Amino acid sequence: MQETLAYSVPDANALPRMGPLAEMLVELNRERPPLARLHHDATVAFGPTMRVERFALGNGLKVLVLVDPSAPVVCLQTWFGVGSRHERVGKTGIAHLFEHLMFGETESVAHGAFDRMLEEAGAETNAATFLDWTYYHTNLPKDALALTLRLEAERMARLVLRDPQVSSEKEVVANERRQRVDDDVDGAVSELLYKEAFTKHAYGWPTIGWMEDIKGFTTEDCVEFYRTYYAPNNAALVIVGDVALDEALRGVQDHYGAQEPSKIPVEEVCPEPPQIAERRAEVVKPTATHKVAIGYHSPALGDFDHAPLALLNEILFSGRSSRVHRALVQEQEIASEVRGWVGSFRDPALYDIYLSARGEHTGEALLAALDPLLEAVRRAPVTEAELDRAKARIELSVLQGLETVAGKAEQIGFYETVLGDPAALFERLAAYRRATVGDLLRVARRYLVSSARTVIHVIPDGTSDEDDEDGTGAESEEAS
């Protein structure tokens, strides 16, 4: 079974045993069956003025509510603790397939009615799957919450899985793979980078799955996966917005309280062994210029080193004033695009670096120009001014992401699912603020090791009409 995470609530935030919240729960639980009974797990500070109330149903469903009456809107998200890392060899891509299947028919909702009913209520809905999680989100007017809870609970427990539906969605996913991976240079290269960098861990296979696995799924495979992972005790329901706490919780009890928990299998994690030699691969693709993808092994999101490495990436790759952009794009004029991203995952992943050449310059020339820049941050500390700018940029990006109820809900659900703490984002901000130039020097020396990296060279096949010689490729603005 999955590990149950305990929370420690500061005394200052502790609620009296017979206070308003306790009295509300007594009323909500009156005459409820055991699976539908709510208990209050924690009050978690979410920034200086807000708080997340964390509850759990008797069936294991986690319910996180942040009341935000600033606008008459609500965001409802359901985060399932299942992603591509939970799949088996030969069954890759089934977590992503379910992202499609979940918008289909249920026992009481006809095919296509789910989206139509929400749209008619003024709501918008979508979903995403990645390595550690799958989540479904709906932005809605406040008066559509009851309808949305009913529809979400319905598809969590009573999805219809028959051969026609499964076969149809398999073909949709196969076409998505052709468009986003097989016929897309960046998608294909990213997939190859992770495949070469990971020899044991499940992060080595793509979220969308290998094509032969997608085509081979049976309806029985889907039913087994659904009954195992789409269960209340493997989900976190996040509600943020203009809601009355008691009414929202009553709706959760009404619609989810009869669902039975499942037996979640123990995940058989295969830790990735240390990489002791550089790995290289070449691919020929329909691109106008040479490209290089580089993967350095990076720390897990919850690791002490993750925040300093994200700050170092900001200094190296983020914006036109970053070190790599200035050197390769502006001064040497050998690259049209440079970007880097530190993977934000539960287990150690990759620090991805992508470079696109300008004109006739080769991937080897790009690598030869990049290596001295990486060696410079390994040899000497970055400046205090650079670090201050990186901290300010990241903090601004984080706070801008919290301006909407959807942004708040996504951060709550993500950190609850990956780290078990719905307010971990604010500890992360504190970690950015605490980081020193010495911390960045340490992580540079620990992770930017050429003997432990994977390099993918992309060679043009001579067929592309793409015009990428003006050096105007967009640089990455991502911040971890």
Image (cartoon, helix red, strand yellow):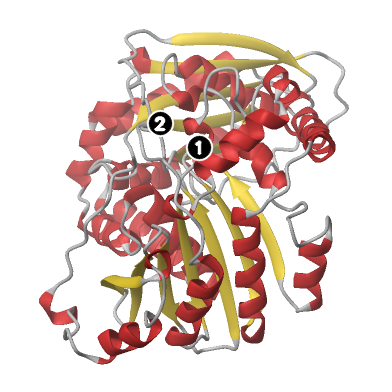
Compared with 22, 182 (above or below) is above
Residue 440 x, y percent position in the rendering = 25, 41
Compared with 7, 327 (above or below) is above
Disc 2 or 1, which lies upstream in sequence? Answer: 1
Observer-nearest of 250 and 403: 250
Compared with 135, 323 (above or below) is above
CA separation in Å, label 2 and label 1: 10 Å
Q: Residue at x 41, y 10 (%)?
A: 278
Residue 215 x, y percent position in the rendering = 76, 22
Answer with the quarter of the image where residue 192 lies: top right
Identify residue type, mark 2: Ala
Asked whether the residues under the numbered discs 2 and 1 touch, taking CB atoms below 8 Å apart as contact, a structural biologist would say yes
Observer-nearest of 318 and 180: 180
Q: Determine whether the residue tagged by mark 1 lies in a helix, strand or loop.
A: loop
Taking the image as shown, residue 347 lies to the left or right of residue 177, namely left
Q: Residues within 10 Å of mark 1 (few under 14, many from 20)?
A: many
> Which disc number belongs to residue 349?
2
Answer with the quarter of the image where residue 439 lies: top left
Taking the image as shown, residue 219 lies to the left or right of residue 454, namely right
Identify residue type, mark 1: Leu
Looking at the image, can residue 366 be seen?
A: no
Q: Residue at x 82, y 63 (%)?
A: 113
Residue linked to disc 1: 131
Q: Residue at x 63, y 23 (%)?
A: 189
Observer-nearest of 461 and 345: 345
